[in-house]
Image: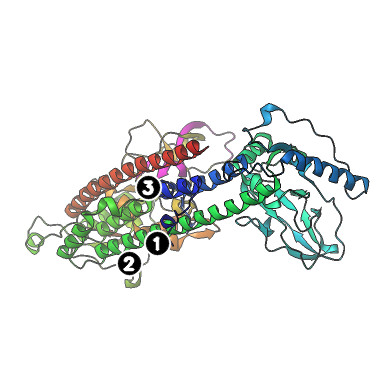
């Protein structure tokens, strides 16, 4: 059953969900993701805000109707206070320290009739600490299934192997809250008995609710925006923010009558299930859309001739506004354009008559001129002679070339240099401070020059590391998207250098097209080569100079290179327009989702 069909006998919040499904499901944020194969590159922002709204309405008393016949929370809290005093008297729990009265400034919102504010310490107690003996179930942060708020996989340990943090006693019904990096919301209820006594890490604050306080309501309050904001106001630390147990116990909680707590928990579960369905439908729709885009773009790549390509392109170009509606699909279109460009499918090849004319120059002639210039520069000792690279085997070639094109290794057509090494000892040498390009400055197809760092280098090395107009800058690595990122230096600044994690590649002859090389290196075949050649560690990767030297480049005849580059620029401009419109639409959807939340509250 679809979310849209569930409107019979709906509550106001259910109407808010179903009447604005397009806004909740369309409000999507792109996440900054790094690492190879990072799967979740988008965030369903609207549905996330909807979940937060449901919890906030719940703890404000706006989710279910109040019943004047319910026992008021004030009576419940009086009974709890007596129960707690009796437990202290019997020596079952320690007498808690008296906490200050709740001030008006602490209360984040007005409560409905029959509700009360109290500090978390007042609705329950902790169960103390002990050093484990014998076999026990150790609950640490990794044991939490935070999606469902349950302890799924405690570690079974012997007392002698207990870590120093394994100290806090918990039992069925206890609510545990991770006080380290609380923004991760590692919160759970101990909902069952374990085969071995459960002991929790001291990284958790513990609250064992007393009679009349529903643990599932407490769990949901701890996840709600009001409590999250309270924690943010008292936590300390930046990289690993944390709160202590006292700060947790000092937090305030809105307490409804017991029967209303049960109604709230049931309604929250019902609405969260609705959100689950909406999320599944949205993700399924996005997946189906991406599959369609991939299939249609593949028809372009698989075209056997210009006529077939033109037909496939016509099918796609008529539906740009419906096909390319996500950043991923537009990025995929860009890569397809580059793939068509570097394989010779984007523009028509020179006709047989043109190839037979005396003015036609195949790529082989261009490469001969480049080789001759390189040899002359070596002879004049302006560049060093490199060890010869191995011949190109058929197995290395990723695709067949059109007539007049040639394969060449990158170093045969450019001079490649490493950059400035940081941290060298320069005592006693005459130095100069210079700006330099780092990996962060080199993006795909452009340079971000908003921030240029400076470094001291020997004056004698200044010319060596100078970046000149038309030089290619190629990144050594970082996360997976940074490997082989290429941009062209086109500014006429007095001086800028490049660090050792950015390679510099300089063309040999004037008529070479550095733009063609930039587009090839940012295209799918070079990216696949860099990924396959990279030295890999976890989410990081890098290439060395030898690997860059050996990269295969497809070289088209010079006249054709210019026509292809012009066509690529024209199509990339369309992609950028699509992206700008998408960004505006996404901003509007995000603002609408925020406005709906504000209106509901």
Query: Element type at marker 3?
Result: loop
Q: Is residue 578 visible?
A: yes
Crowdedness near tag 2: few (<14), some (14–19) or many (≥20) residues, C-alpha within 10 Å: some
Q: CA distance from mark 3 to mark 1?
A: 16 Å
Residue that carries the numbered disc 2 in the rendered image: 398
Which numbered disc, 3 or 1, marks the residue closer to the eye?
A: 3
**Residue contact at pointers 2 and 1, CB within 8 angstroms:** yes
Please name the residue shown 65% across and 55% down the image.
Answer: 149
Tally the numbered discs. Answer: 3
Q: In screen coordinates, is 231 left or right of 589?
A: right
Colouring used for the render: rainbow
Q: Quadrant of residue 344?
A: bottom left
Residue that carries the numbered disc 3 in the rendered image: 444
Disc ID at residue 250: none
In the rendered structure, does residue 219 fall within the stretch colored magenta? no
Q: In screen coordinates, is 68 left or right of 322?
A: right
In the rendered structure, which disc, 2 or 3, sits on the residue that comes first in sequence?
2
Q: Provide the residue span drawn in magenta.
A: 425-447
Percent x, y of residue 37:
47, 59
Percent x, y of residue 594:
47, 39
Query: Element type at marker 2?
Result: loop
In the rendered structure, which disc, 3 or 1, sits on the residue that comes first in sequence?
3
Residue that carries the numbered disc 1 in the rendered image: 529
Please name the residue shown 67% across and 63% down the image.
Answer: 152
Q: CA distance from mark 2 to mark 3?
A: 22 Å
Q: Is residue 281 above or below residue 108?
A: below
Percent x, y of residue 139:
74, 58
């Amino acid at each position: 059953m679809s979310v849209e069909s569930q409107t019979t006998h709906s509550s106001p919040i259910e109407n808010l969900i179903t009447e604005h499904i397009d806004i909740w499901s369309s409000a999507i944020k792109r996440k900054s993701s790094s690492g190879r194969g990072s799967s979740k590159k988008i965030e369903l922002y609207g549905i996330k805000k909807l979940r937060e709204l449901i919890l906030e309405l719940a703890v404000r008393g706006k989710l279910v109707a109040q019943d004047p016949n319910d026992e008021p929370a004030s009576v419940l809290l009086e009974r709890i206070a007596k129960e707690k005093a009796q437990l202290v008297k019997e020596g079952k729990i320690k007498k808690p320290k008296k906490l200050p009265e709740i001030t008006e400034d602490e209360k984040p919102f007005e409560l409905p009739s029959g509700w009360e504010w109290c500090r978390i310490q007042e609705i329950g107690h902790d169960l103390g600490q002990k050093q484990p003996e014998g076999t026990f179930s150790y609950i640490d942060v990794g044991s939490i299934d935070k999606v469902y708020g349950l302890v799924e996989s405690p570690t079974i340990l012997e007392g002698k192997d207990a870590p120093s943090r394994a100290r806090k006693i918990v039992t069925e019904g206890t609510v545990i809250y991770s006080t380290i990096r609380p923004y991760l919301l590692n919160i759970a209820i101990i909902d069952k008995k374990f085969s071995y006594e459960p002991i929790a890490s001291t990284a958790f604050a513990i609250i064992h609710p007393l009679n009349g306080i529903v643990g599932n309501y407490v769990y949901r309050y701890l996840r709600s925006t009001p409590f999250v904001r309270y924690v943010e106001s008292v936590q300390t630390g930046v990289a690993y923010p944390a709160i202590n147990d006292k700060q947790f116990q000092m937090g305030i909680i809105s307490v409804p009558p017991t029967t209303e707590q049960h109604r709230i928990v049931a309604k929250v579960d019902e609405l969260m299930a609705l959100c689950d369905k909406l999320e599944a439908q949205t993700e399924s729709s996005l997946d189906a859309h991406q599959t369609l885009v991939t299939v249609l773009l593949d028809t372009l790549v698989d075209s056997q001739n210009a006529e077939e390509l033109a037909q496939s392109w016509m099918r796609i170009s008529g539906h740009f506004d419906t096909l390319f509606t996500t950043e991923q699909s537009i990025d995929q279109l860009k890569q397809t354009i580059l793939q068509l460009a570097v394989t010779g499918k984007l523009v028509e090849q020179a006709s047989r008559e043109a190839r037979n004319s005396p003015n036609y120059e195949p790529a082989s002639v261009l490469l001969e001129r480049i080789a001759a210039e390189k040899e002359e520069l070596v002879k004049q000792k302006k560049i060093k002679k490199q060890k010869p690279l191995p011949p190109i085997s058929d197995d290395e070639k990723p695709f067949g070339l059109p007539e007049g094109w040639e394969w060449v290794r990158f170093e045969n057509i450019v001079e490649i240099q490493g950059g400035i090494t940081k941290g060298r000892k320069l005592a006693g040498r005459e130095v100069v401070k210079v700006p330099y390009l780092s990996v962060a400055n080199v993006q795909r197809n452009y340079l971000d020059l908003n921030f240029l760092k400076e470094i001291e280098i020997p004056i004698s090395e200044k010319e060596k590391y100078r970046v000149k107009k038309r030089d290619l800058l190629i990144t050594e690595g970082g996360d997976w998207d940074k490997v082989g990122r290429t941009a062209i230096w086109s500014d006429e600044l007095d001086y800028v250098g490049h660090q050792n994690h950015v390679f510099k590649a300089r063309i040999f002859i004037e008529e070479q097209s550095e733009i063609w090389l930039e587009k090839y290196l940012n295209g799918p075949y070079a990216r696949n080569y860099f990924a396959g050649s990279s030295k890999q560690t976890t989410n990081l990767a890098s290439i060395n100079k030898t690997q860059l030297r050996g990269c295969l480049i497809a070289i088209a005849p010079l006249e054709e290179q210019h026509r292809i580059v012009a066509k690529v620029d024209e199509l990339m401009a369309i992609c950028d327009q699509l992206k700008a419109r998408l960004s505006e639409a996404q901003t509007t959807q995000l603002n609408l989702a925020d406005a709906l939340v504000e209106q509901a509250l």
